[in-house]
Amino acid sequence: MVLGELGGRIARAIQQMSNATIVDENVLNECLREITRALLQADVRFELVRDTQTNIKNAVNLDRLATGYNKRNIIQQAIFNELCKMLDTEKPSFTPKKGKTSVVMFVGLQGSGKTTTCTKYAHYYQKKGWKPALVCSDTFRAGAFDQLKQNATKAKIPFYGSYVESDPVQIAIEGVARFKEENCDLIIVDTSGRHKQEAALFEEMRQVSEATNPDLAIFVMDGSIGQAAYDQAQAFKQSVAVGAVIVTKMDGHAKGGGALSAVAATKSPLIFIGTGEHMHEFEVFNVKPFVKRLLGMGDLSDLIDRIQDVGPMDQQPYHTQPEHMQKLLEGNFTLRIMYEQYQSMLKMGPMGQCRVDAKRPGKGKPSKCRVDAKRPEKGNPSKDEMLHELDDIDPKLTESRTMRIARGSGRQVAEVIEMLDEYKRWANSWRSKMKGFLKIPKKGGMS
Ligand code: GDP
């Protein structure tokens, strides 16, 4: 079961409870049973599910609710709070301070995505003005240094490693010392992994940790490992002081339960998720917006976060390039931005699908534009025309132009109209959000 499915099942259980004529103990129990089943099938650890169920029941306490209370809202809120609690350790992770040297050590099993994530993490902070550096102390996996070197070079991040030194501790010490001298304020140490948890791995990790005295140890976990997540995370936590978790490969068929269990096992917050192999496929993890999306209660606020988050870089998506960014900040939500949003969410597989639906402002049937979003990339003959429309859409399309677009994109006219209606909802929602956030002056346009 994938995360999108988990969210869908929980959301349906809440909906069924809301539809009941009278909300009593039986209705609440049935709703909780369905949520429990969904969580267990998503590989969330049994103890965690049991505690969640008990906490929701305690928080709601139907007997003590006087008449007049909106029981449905209280139950919904309790479920939302408990799901947030599962992912929120209430212990904020260490965050590096600009201009002050921090050492961050990455640990995890081989293949979890550790080396890739080190560079993504460095790149994330580099964009925000930090001066990061990468140290490869993974001497176990052949090719680890070459991989880190290649990634670091691409992102223009200084790196340190050795083809001859076989002692990872020595490399870590030398790398950290070198970058401290060079005034790097974020020194990231990639450590060795193993195929499975074993004493040698943990001993090496412990030694590297002792030698470099990191401010933060990040446990990197493959999001698709399911039930094994809790024990794996706990084993790492017992060897080094894990202070944060990053779950990778959330673009595939990741089991959401693994992520939840790792957070519970390490009592450390999930700070980022990896959503692809490329450098920019990396997202800051925020509990509340995530759970909201999971339950279909999403809005555009995470999109705003992402847009406010970016700095200059070569491979930026269209909407984060400076000239378009300015437009966007003025409240101009173009069709191309909607297209990009759909594309990036579609890439996230079923989880992204859940997010597409959750993010759509307003209710109603999802438009076929989720599918159309892929079309222009497929090199169909109308590509230029379609891209032009994406940049410069006129909401008051004439009938003939609508027909031309339909012809050019191989779609029915009704589908084009439906997609434009959806676009208008996004654009209006965006404009009102931006007004709230940035106090922009009202602009004419979409209605
Ligand atoms: P390490 O052995 O833990 O250092 O793992 P690597 O960084 O070498 O990653 C193992 C594989 O997972 C590589 O093929 C990466 O490209 C891939 N990978 C890493 N993170 C992600 C992710 O978030 N999504 C996807 N789809 N692949 C990833």
Image (cartoon, rainbow, N blue to C red):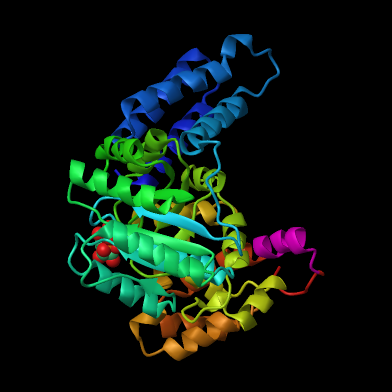
Most distant residue in the top direction: 63
Q: Main secondary structure of the magenta part?
A: helix
Figure quadrant of residue 161: bottom left
Front residue of 113/24: it is: 113
Q: Which residues are magenta?
A: 428-440
- The residue depicted at 29 percent of the width and 37 percent of the height is 235
Task: Answer with left or right where residue 348 lies relative to residue 58.
Answer: left
Visible residue check, residue 120: no
Figure quadrant of residue 190: bottom left
Q: Which image quarter is the N terminus in?
A: top left
Front residue of 265/360: it is: 265
Q: Which image quarter is the C terminus in?
A: bottom right
> Does 439 appear in magenta?
yes
Relative to 433, is 82 above or below?
above
Visible residue check, residue 199: yes
> Does 44 appear in magenta?
no
Percent from the top left, x then y, of residue 248? 35, 55
Assign ligand 1 to one image quadrant: bottom left
Relative to 334, is 428 above or below?
above
- The residue depicted at 41 percent of the width and 76 percent of the height is 411
Percent from the top left, x then y, of residue 198? 18, 42
Percent from the top left, x then y, of residue 293? 50, 48
Relative to 371, is 3 above or below?
above
- The residue depicted at 36 percent of the width and 71 percent of the height is 160
Task: Answer with left or right where residue 326 lies relative to residue 128.
Answer: right
Query: In this figure, what is the number of numbered marks?
Result: 0
Task: Answer with left or right where residue 236 lies relative to residue 398.
Answer: left
Percent from the top left, x then y, of residue 87? 47, 38
